[in-house]
Image (spheres, grey):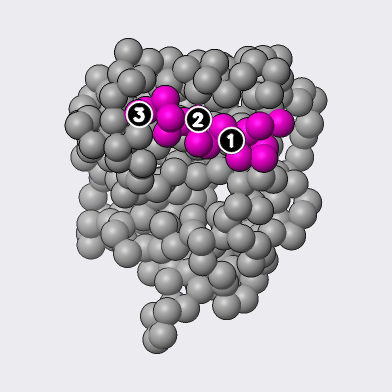
Amino acid sequence: MYGIYGIRYEEGKMGLILEVKNLTKKFGGLTAVNDVNFEVHRGEILGLIGPNGAGKTTLFQLISGFEKPNSGSVRFNGVDITGKRPCQIVNLGLARTFQLVRSFRFLSLLDNISVACLSPRGREAFGEVGIDAAASSILASVGLVDKARLPPVILPHGDLRKLEIGKALGTNPEFLLLDEPFSGLAHEESAGITRLIEQLHEEGVTVFMTGHVLRELMTLVPRVIAMHQGRLIAEGPPKEVASNKIVLEAYLGRGEGFA
């Protein structure tokens, strides 16, 4: 089938796409990620929750190559990517967004997306349709095509969040890590991002996402894993994890439900 920007994804591929085994990361005396083990199935939307300081972003850093683990391994599509550079990992098909949005502030939105499309994997995917056409299509998919000639420096935070996802899509990912994709968005903007993630899922992109906006995340994902103090403390369907006493205590310090 064809994706939102005209690229054909592979159909019929099954099984695991990501395997994390005994992953540990220490910063001095602080263990930010502590012996973490989990798997992600191809085509899945998986959620990652946990209070501030749980280790969620550090886990994303390790998977995407921005940090190197002290021990453990990460395998993507059966390939050991532990310790590989981010540019190597993204060109294998694993892209990410950042909790703090990053952009070329004075380039146009179109040029920001085009830079991502010029990655080796992007050029291979978009060569036939052309980089400008691919970038325009991606901007349309994230709801920013009417602002294609504007620079990010003048845009509100909600639009910058959309641009962050668009830049990741410019690398033609098979697996997408979304770090706080709803952060700073109004309800209507969050609904648009939810529709985009659902569409990407329908078109074959595997999504692993974290967030503090629990209502949006928990209604979107069929499976959730929870972290606290660097360890995984629960895994399962959203309602089951949300009612888990250990998870509630980690978030709230008491056994009450989520708001």
Q: Is residue 196 above or below residue 205?
A: above
Q: Which one is in front, 147 or 26?
A: 147
Side (left or right) of 164 relative to 122: left
Cα–Cα span, label 3 and label 2: 10 Å
Residue 228 appears in the rendering: no
Side of 208 relative to 215 (left or right):
right
Sequence-earlier tag: 3 or 2: 3
Amino acid found under the numbered disc labelled 2: Ser
Q: Which residue is mark 3?
A: 108
Distance from Cα at disc 1 to Cα at disc 3: 15 Å
| Residue 77 % position (x, y) | 75, 46
Q: Residue at x 76, y 23 (%)?
A: 11
Q: Which residue is mark 2?
A: 114
**Cβ–Cβ below 8 Å for labels 2 and 1?**
yes
The disc label shown at residue 118, or none: 1
Query: Which amino acid does the dot numbered 3 rest on?
Result: Ser
Q: Amino acid at mark 1?
A: Leu
Q: Which stretch did the figure color magenta?
A: 108-124
Q: Are marks 1 and 3 in contact (CB under 8 Å)?
A: no
Q: Quadrant of residue 147?
A: top left
Predominant secondary structure, magenta span: helix
Instruction: Indicate the quadrant containing the C terminus: top left, top right, bottom left or bottom right.
Output: top left
Q: Up-down: is 62 above or below 103?
A: below
Q: Residue at x 64, y 67 (%)?
A: 83
